[in-house]
Amino acid sequence: MWLLLAFVSAALLGFYDTSKKAALKDNAVLPVLLLNTLFSTLLFSPVIMDGIVGRDWFDGTMFDSAGDVGSFKAHVLVLIKAVIVLTSWIAGYFGLKHIPITIVGPINATRPVLVLVGAMLLFGERLNWCQWIGVILSILSIYLMSRSSKKEQIDFRKNKWIWCVAGGTIMGAVSGLYDKFIMSELSPIFVQSWFNLYQFIMMLIICMLIWYPTRRQTTPFHWSWAIPLISIFVASADFSYFNALSMPDSMISVVSLIRRGSVLISFACGVLIFKERNLKAKAIDLLLILIGMIFVYFGSR
C-alpha cells in the first residue's frame, strides 16, 4: 500500500511543479507562496479546528490528530519542519521562476541521492556498490546538464537561480531525512495540517516585512488560477507521502526515490505547455538520472 501511495504522490508532485511554473510566470514570488500556504492551511482547517476545540470530529479516522495537539514537543517538531520546508520552497520558487522546468526537474530528481548520502553521514548507513553507481550517475548527469544548459545562456557556476534551485533541493533532502524521524513520533495528518499553518504565519510575516514595502519596485503580483492548483496538488501529494511513511514497513529511501519520478510529468509539461528548448540534451541528462535512481532503488531493497 505504501508503494502505491508513493506513486500517487509522485504523479501529483509533477502537476504541482507544473502549476508552480505557470503561477510564477511574470509574477511576484513571495505573495504566490503566501497564497499557497494560505490555501493549504484552509484545506486542513477542519483538522486544525478539531484539534483546538477537542470535538473529536475525526476520531478513529486517518484525519484524527487529537493525540498530538496538546503536546508542546509535537508542535516544536512540526515548527522545525515548517522552517526547513519553507526555506526549501522560497529558494526553489525563485529558481523555478527564472530557470526552465526541464532543467529544474532533473536537478530536483537528484534529491533521493542526497537523502541517501545524508543517511550515510547522519545515521551511519553504508552505501553498497549499486547505490554508489546511482550516486555517480546522478553527479555525472548534473555535470552534463551544466554543459548543455550553456546553450540557453545558463552557467551553473555563476547563475544565482541555479544556486537557488540547488539550495531548495538540498533543503528538500534535509526535510526528507527529518521526516524519517518525525513520522515515527507524530501522526501524518497532525504534521501536515499544523506545518501548513506555521508556514502561512511565517510567510505572512515575511511578506509584510520584505515584499509589501517594496512591492512597487519589484515584479508586480497578479492573480493566476494556477495558484490554488499549487495548494491542491501539494496537499494531496504530501497527504499520500506522509501516510506512506507512517506505515511500519515503508522505506524513506524508496519512497523519496519514487516521488522524484514526478520529473517525468514536469518534463513532459515543460515540452508540451511551456515549449522549452534544447530537449535532446536534457532528455539524455534526465535518462542518466533515472538510470541512477533505478540503481539506488535496487540497492535499497
Image (cartoon, rainbow, N blue to C red):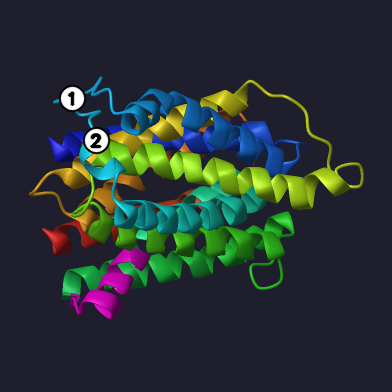
Secondary structure of residue under mark 1: loop
Q: Nearer the viewer, residue 181 or 288?
A: 181
Mark 2 or mark 1: name the one nearer the start of the chain: 1
The amino acid sitting under disc 1 is Asp
List x then y, in percent, for residue 278. Answer: 62, 48
The residue that label 2 is drawn on is 66
Q: Give the quarter of the image for residue 67.
A: top left
**Residue 62's spot in the image, x, y percent?**
20, 29
**x and y, in percent, of residue 109 in the image:** 41, 54
Q: Distance between the Cα atoms at labels 2 and 1?
A: 8 Å
Tell me where residue 157 sits by quadrant. Answer: bottom right
Q: Which residue is mark 1?
A: 59
The quadrant in which the N terminus is found is top left
User: Which amino acid does the dot numbered 2 rest on?
Assistant: Ala
* Residue in the picture at 77% in, 52% down: 210
Going 58% across and 52% down the picture, which residue do you hit?
92
Quick one: quadrant of the C terminus? bottom left
Decide whether the magenta segment is chiefly helix, strand or loop. Answer: helix
Depth check, front residue: 291 or 31 = 31
Name of the residue lying farthest toward the right: 217
Mark 1 residue crowding within 10 angstroms, few (<14) / some (14–19) / many (20+)? few
Name which residue lies at 56% across and 24% down. Answer: 228
**Magenta-colored stretch includes residue 181:** no
Q: Which residues are magenta?
A: 114-127
Task: Decide if residue 10 is in sight here.
Answer: no
